[in-house]
Image: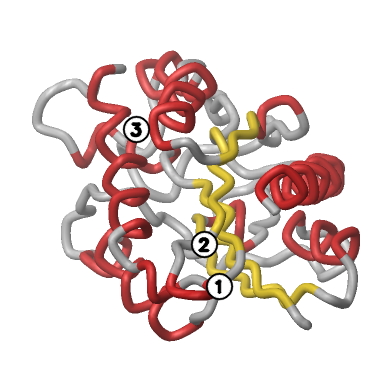
Amino acid sequence: MTRKILCYGDSNTWGVIPRWETTSLPSERYDKKTRWTQVMAADLGQEWELIEEGLGGRTTMYQIPGEDYRRGDWYLTPCLLSHRPLDCIVLMLGSNDLQPRMHEQPFTREQMYAGPRRLLDLILAQPQCGVGNQPPKILLLAPTPLKLPQVPPRVPGAIDETSVHLSHEFASVYEEIAKEYGCGFLDAGLFACPDDSDGAHFTKESHVRLGHGVAAAVISMVKQES
């Protein structure tokens, strides 16, 4: 029987190729042999069906002015309902929450908990989206730490020193949340890192390493809960 796995995230789940020059051209995407989602799917095997759901700029629950559609919480429920039944969800969001342009006051470590909790609550509130009217298994990925970009960002206020500082808290914050909700956890920073150019998007090698790491975590999680 085929199992379905949903990877819900932002541009690093979509597979954006980092650039060393500022351009107005649309983002380019790593190919299927490179993207971590596809590497993961290859490791899992043909009994798994992959659903890639990555959107550039997607936040957990925070609103980018004029771009409501990038709120991860607003799209998550219809996404779950349209792809059900799901066996597993790999969730990696939070990097875009740190953009200072979205917050009137400086964002804090304490505020980093709210977004992932909101998404997990939405998943658990839709048990019909899993198999046998049970919520899907969830693997929460802590996003990787950011870097200050060497290329001017296309959008002013996307990453600053505070964003970079807070991004180093992802692993500890998300691990706490995973324990609180009883779901799987993986620190993406152990496998991947952003390219020096834009400070946010994964290197090619990072995608491959992360794909193998996520696949191993999914296999382990499924075995433990079966």
- Residue 197 as seen in the image, left or right of residue 180: right
Q: Residue at x 77, y 32 (%)?
A: 191
Disc 1 + disc 2, Cβ < 8 Å: yes
Tag 1: amino acid: Leu
- Disc with the residue nearer the chain's start (1 vs 2): 1
Q: Nearer the viewer, residue 4 or 95?
A: 4
Kindly identify which residue carries mark 1: 86
x and y percentages locating residue 2 in the rendered image: 76, 81
Of residues 72 and 55, the one nearer the viewer is 72
Which-is-in-front pick, marks 3 and 1? 1
Check if mark 2's residue and mark 3's residue have beta carbons within 8 Å.
no
In this rendering, position of residue 65 left or right of residue 206: left
Q: Separation of disc 1 and disc 2 at Cα?
A: 6 Å
**Residue labelled with disc 2:** 136
Residue 43 vertical position relative to residue 191 in the rendered view, above or below: below
Q: Amino acid at mark 3?
A: Leu
Q: Residue at x 39, y 24 (%)?
A: 163
Amino acid type at image mark 2: Pro
Give residue 63's position: percent from left, percent from top.
20, 53
Residue 207, can we see it? Answer: no
Of helix, strand and loop, which one carries label 2?
loop
N-terminal-most mark, 2 or 3: 3
Residue 171, image x and y in percent? 54, 22
Pick the front one: 67 or 151: 67
Q: Is residue 224 above or below residue 54?
A: above
- Between circles 2 and 3, the one closer to the viewer is 2
Label at residue 98? 3
Dividing the picture into quarters, in which one does residue 221 lie? top right
Residue 12 visible to the viewer? yes
Residue 166 placement (x, y as % from top left): 40, 18
Vertical order, 45 against 219 (above or below): below
119 over 220 or under it: above or below: below
